[in-house]
Amino acid sequence: MAERLALVLATLLVLLRPAFAAGGGEFSYMTLNGVKAAAVAIQGIEPGFARYGLTLPPLQAAVESQLRQSGIEIVSYEDAVRRPDAALVQVKFRTNQSEYQFYFYNLALEVREKIPLGNAAGGFVSVLIWSDAQQGSVQPTDLPRITKVVDDVVAVFVREYQAQNAVKR
């Protein structure tokens, strides 16, 4: 057993060594700087959650409100595709119900920005520029508490966004 644990630890050290050698962080800087507008897309809120009080419209409105208050203009998905300065904020909600009826969830907030391809059609690829996630479990009757988890993750994003877009006087 001890040999097995030592082998696992040694393997992890070898695999993680490049990350530690490079400073431990992702190779990116000021990724949120200059984001002015965004569309919001929320995925994974199942219709069956409505019987417990968790529905898409209030969650969408809450996320958009927090982003608006931080200075980000909220646009439709179609406008975000057309506008070169618009990003996409995705809230991805994944659940798995246990045999005891609890829901295990993973809630991820991802921000994607466009990189133009420089072609005549105005093509672009989107790239993930920021993300955060929370995991947990709730009883079905507590599914509305997910709104608080979403608020917390959006608040982390807003703090980082505001730090990178601080107005200099």
Image: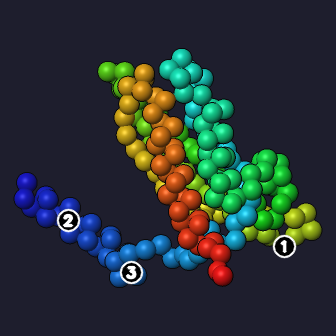
Residue at the extreme top of the image, as rendered: 51
Task: Report x, y in % for residue 117.
Answer: 80, 70
Q: Is residue 65 left or right of residue 150?
A: right
Q: Are marks 2 and 1 in contact (CB under 8 Å)?
A: no
Task: Report x, y in % for residue 69.
Answer: 65, 54
Element class at badge 3: loop
Residue at the extreme right of the image, as rendered: 120
Q: Is residue 30 above or below residue 87?
A: below
Q: Is residue 127 visible?
A: yes
Pick whichever, 123 or 169, lies toward us: 169
Q: Earlier in the sequence, mark 3 or mark 2?
A: 2
Pick the quarter of the image with the C terminus: bottom right
Q: Is residue 137 above or below residue 130?
A: above
Give the mark toward the camera: 2 or 1: 1
Q: Are marks 3 and 2 in contact (CB under 8 Å)?
A: no
Please name the colour scheme applied to the rendered image.
Answer: rainbow
Amino acid at the residue labelled 3? Gly
Q: Callout 2: few (<14), some (14-19), or many (20+) C-alpha neighbours within 10 Å?
A: few
- The residue tagged 1 is 118
- The residue tagged 3 is 23
Give the mark toward the camera: 3 or 2: 3
- The residue tagged 2 is 9
Q: Callout 1: few (<14), some (14-19), or many (20+) C-alpha neighbours within 10 Å?
A: few
Q: Is residue 142 left or right of residue 39?
A: left
Pick whichever, 39 or 159, lies toward us: 159
Residue at the extreme front of the image, as rendered: 169
* Separation of marks 2 and 1 at Cα, in angstroms: 46 Å
Residue depicted at x 78% and y 65%: 85
As drawn, the label of residue 165 is: none
Amino acid at the residue labelled 2? Leu
Q: Are marks 1 and 3 in contact (CB under 8 Å)?
A: no
